[in-house]
């Protein structure tokens, strides 16, 4: 029974659509025929067309940017004349330069580290960075 009721409803829908479409088509044809039968004759004379006349105005050029250069500084005064000094008096004492002793020739390698000496211990971090966990892990108390 369900299939028969469905088919009847489907037929009613299409019949209504065809009826409305046919009425609309015939009414448009009748209106067009009425307009043609009662209309004026075709326009055969030449109509004068009016064109809009306008003058294009050129826009003003943009203003030039202001010159913000600093003023030229005044010339510096000339340097004072050099004074020539007399050589040191022979009686003046000069402090002697002390040279450190040279390392032994058989040391080899980096200074301060001997061949039989090794570096021991673990590396120590200079900065400890705190871990940045996602919010969901922080709420549940998960680490790692």
Image (tube, grey):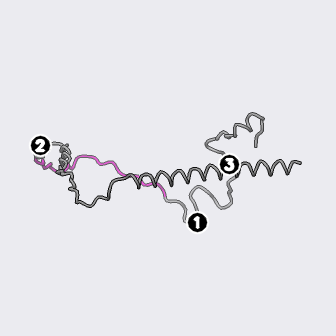
Q: Tell me, yes or no, whether the highlighted magenta stretch contains residue 9.
A: no
Taking depth in this image into account, of 122 and 119 the one nearest to the observer is 122
Q: Tell me, yes or no, whether the highlighted magenta stretch contains residue 91.
A: yes
Cα distance between the residues tagged 3 and 1: 115 Å
**Mark 3 or 2, nearer chain start:** 3
**Mark 2 or 1, nearer chain start:** 2
Q: In the figure, 129 relative to 106: above or below?
A: above
Q: Position of residue 43 (x, y in %)?
A: 29, 58
Q: Position of residue 89 (x, y in %)?
A: 19, 48
Foreground label between 3 and 1 = 3
* Residue underneath mark 3: 16
SS type, badge 3: helix
Q: Quadrant of residue 111?
A: bottom right
* Residue underneath mark 1: 106
Q: Position of residue 125 (x, y in %)?
A: 64, 45
Looking at the image, residue 105 sits to the left or right of residue 16; the answer is left
Q: Mark number for residue 74? A: 2
**Mark 3 or 1, nearer chain start:** 3
Q: Quadrant of residue 126?
A: top right
Q: Tell me which residue sits at (24%, 46%) in the image.
A: 92
Asked if disc 3 and disc 2 are in contact, CB closer than 8 Å, the reply is no
Give the extent of the magenta segment. 80-101
């Amino acid at each position: 029974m369900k299939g028969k009721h469905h088919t009847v409803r489907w037929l009613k829908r299409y019949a209504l659509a065809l009826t409305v479409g046919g009425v609309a088509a015939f009414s448009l044809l009748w209106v067009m025929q009425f307009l043609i039968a009662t209309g004026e004759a075709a326009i055969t004379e030449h109509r004068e067309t009016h064109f809009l006349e306008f003058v294009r105005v050129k826009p003003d050029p943009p203003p030039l940017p202001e010159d913000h250069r600093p003023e030229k500084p005044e010339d510096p005064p000339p340097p004072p004349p050099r004074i020539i000094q007399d050589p040191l008096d022979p009686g003046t004492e000069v402090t002697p330069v002390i040279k450190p002793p040279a390392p032994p020739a058989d040391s080899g390698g980096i200074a301060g580290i001997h061949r039989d000496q090794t570096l021991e211990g673990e590396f120590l971090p200079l900065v400890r960075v705190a871990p940045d966990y996602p919010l969901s892990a922080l709420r549940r108390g998960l680490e790692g």
